[in-house]
Image (spheres, rainbow, N blue to C red):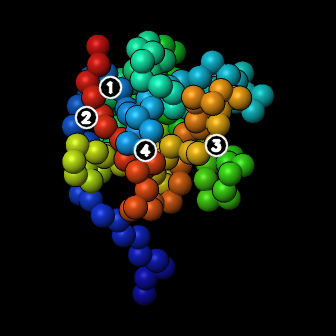
Amino acid sequence: EVDYVRAWSGTATGGGPVSNGSTYRFTNKKDNKVLQESIEVFANNSTGRYVNAVPSNINTNVQKWKAVDVGSGYFRFESKSSNKAVTESLEVFSENADGRYVISIPTNTGWNSQKWRSIDVGGGYHRLQNKLSGKMLTYSNEVFGGNSDARYVIARTLNTSWDSQKWTIDLSN
């Protein structure tokens, strides 16, 4: 008996181009915007910050993420600015009931919501899949914080045709 079957295109790479202790920038294929830790507080949580996507011409530590190997092909990505980890929130994203906010919060080594794996989808792009939910890191169409150049980053169920779920993973210093 099978409860459900989840399928995706691509190859689970057991970390792909990611290696423990290295620092990366993630750029989305859809709009060429970079994953960034915002300064805006998440939902009245003084320790949490939104993660968003912004133009790539701002090369600061809020756009750089250190990979920490947490085993079984998964990594935790910690902001070079705050050492907080990219985390799938349990809060439903306003755009779609399937979506969840992606935030940065203090590291908790036991939380699967802070564990991500890279799936090679070809052409230099990867999907980042969350261990807790199986959802993919996704660039949203919804404008972030009134800034027309910024977008929310959320976790959503896989859609193989969406460029919004494809990221380049580039070494940074």
Residue 142: mark: 3
- Under circle 1, the secondary element is strand
Are the two marked residues, 1 and 2, in contact with CB atoms closer than 8 angstroms? yes
Residue 24: mark: 1
> Farthest residue in the bottom direction?
1
Q: Position of residue 158 (x, y in %)?
A: 45, 60
According to the picture, the residue beneath numbered tag 2 turns out to be 18
According to the picture, the residue beneath numbered tag 4 turns out to be 30
Q: In the rendered structure, which disc, 1 or 2, sits on the residue that comes first in sequence?
A: 2
Q: In the rendered structure, which disc, 1 or 3, sits on the residue that comes first in sequence?
A: 1
Residue at the location (39% across, 62% down)?
Answer: 160
Q: In the rendered structure, which disc, 2 or 4, sits on the residue that comes first in sequence?
A: 2
Q: In the rendered structure, which disc, 4 or 1, sits on the residue that comes first in sequence?
A: 1
Quadrant including the C terminus: top left
Front position among marks 1 and 2 = 1
Front position among marks 1 and 3 = 3
